[in-house]
Image: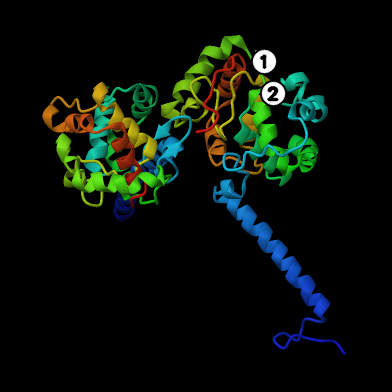
Amino acid sequence: MKAGGLRIALQMAVLAVLIPAAGFADEVKEKLEYCKNCHGNQAQGFQGYYTAPRLAGQPVQYLENQFEALAKHRRDNPIAQQFMWPGIEGVPQGLRAAIAKQFNELNPPPADGGPRNLVSAGKDIYDKGVPDENVPACAVCHGQDAHGNDQVPRLAGQMYAYTVEQLAGWEKGYRGKDPVSPGETNTMQPIAAGMTKDQIRAVAAYLSYQR
Amino acid sequence: MRETFPFDRSIGSKAEIMKLLKSTIAVLAMASSSLFALSGHAEEGHRNCRANPGGEWPIDPAAYVVRNCAFCHGPSLQGLAVAPRLAGQHQDYIIYQLERFKNQERNNPFSLKYMSHVAVSVQPDSYCELGAYISTMATEARCDGNEALAAKGEEIFRHGVPNDNIPACQFCHGPEAQGVGKFPRLGGQSYYYLKRRLEQWVEGYGTISPHMPGIASKLNPEQIDAIASYLSFLPAAPSPGEY
């Protein structure tokens, strides 16, 4: 009798651990599918009426920082407001680390490309910067392979239109507003300001094809 | 005496072998074209109007449309009964659907009964010009939904329902449901048509959109009613047309 009772108790304990775990995994999976509606079925990015950036292969720290910036409404460009603010509200705090990890592990090929004729000029800027404008080589922070790390985003395979929008839009002050380390997170402001529209398009085109 | 190929004595005459070869090639061709469609690379087999805008089709598209489409789709293609409004719809979308009707991938009952036969007789050479002409036709909002539900429909259209994992329709269809490229203009379309389409995505017909079945499966009837109502009142808004 006692042994039977103990066994049942043990089984209940195991189930109590497993069922929530199974429930959590399901929740993460469903939430991921939700994100993929706009970000692409492999998070490679997607072009609807609007452009959703590639999230696949992004460093976990970068994604978590973006979740935070969006949830706290620091990242406030008009598209973020329309889509990401409601979107993030549907991603409970407890799911975010797991979701960031899932995105990080995806590795699809680049979704679409920018103008091919700009790629070699773009690679030049990526590797060497624009010294006359004090624009450092992107590779210095984003990596030779443009895979980023920690809080520095991956750029390889990013949607062309998105990269152009971000670089050209930096002057509008929508990004880089982390109150804890404003200097660090707004590193890009003078860099984006030092690039011409043509240079921005070239770099974006180059990056859109990188794996 | 019957000739046989040395490698297979069970096949009979040369004629039989040729027949086998022809049907194998036909099957391979069909398989590869449907693989194309399934893999999402349908664009490659699909008419590329930017690369090849046409201009050689001898028939005036305005006259063609009156003679062949208005009978079901209404005067000026504003829509009639179950046939949706086509006026103002995007060239890419029109062409993509003509192809889907023709190959019967779009195979719900009305499509099979009417459009699959019609689509067979629309010449592929005409697609670009027909699509371009239809996209320039003026549209009128059908306004046949339930006004009381429009506000709720707008909320879902703009922001989705994040807690139920329903994405925002406007992400693909545009802020005024004007659509772009293969994403159809929904603004001003008939409530009845939109409602039926939303219901149809989960009824197991051919998957002509990789996205819509999953999204529609999460909508309950009240939400469908609300979205379709809201959309039916939207006036035509400009669209970039193509990306």
CA separation in Å, label 1 and label 2: 9 Å
At label 1, the amino acid type is: Arg
Identify the image quadrant of the N terminus of chain B: bottom right
Q: What residue is rendered at 78% in x and 86% in y?
A: B4
Residue A208's quadrant in the figure? top left
Question: What numbered label is drawn on residue A64?
Answer: none
At label 2, the amino acid type is: Arg
Could you tell me residue A158's position as x and y percent? 34, 42
Q: What residue is rendered at 46% in x and 25% in y?
A: B160
Q: Residues within 10 Å of mark 1 (few under 14, many from 20)?
A: many
Q: Residues within 10 Å of mark 2 (few under 14, many from 20)?
A: many
**Could one spot residue A157 in this view of the protein?**
no
User: Circle 1 — which element?
Assistant: loop
Vertical comparison of A104 with A170: above or below:
below
Q: Is the image coloured rainbow, by chain, by secondary structure, or in one colour?
A: rainbow
- Give the camera-side residue of B43 and B51: B51
Question: What numbered label is drawn on residue B142?
Answer: 1
Which label's residue is closer to the chain start, 1 or 2? 2
Residue named by callout 2: B85
Q: Disc 1: which chain?
A: B
- Given contact means CB atoms under 8 Å apart, are the residues at marks 1 and 2 in contact? yes
- Give the camera-side residue of B196 and A58: A58
Could you tell me residue B141's position as x and y percent? 64, 15
Vertical comparison of A68 with A126: above or below:
above
Q: What residue is rendered at 75% in x and 42% in y?
A: B123
Vertical comparison of A32 with B177: above or below:
below
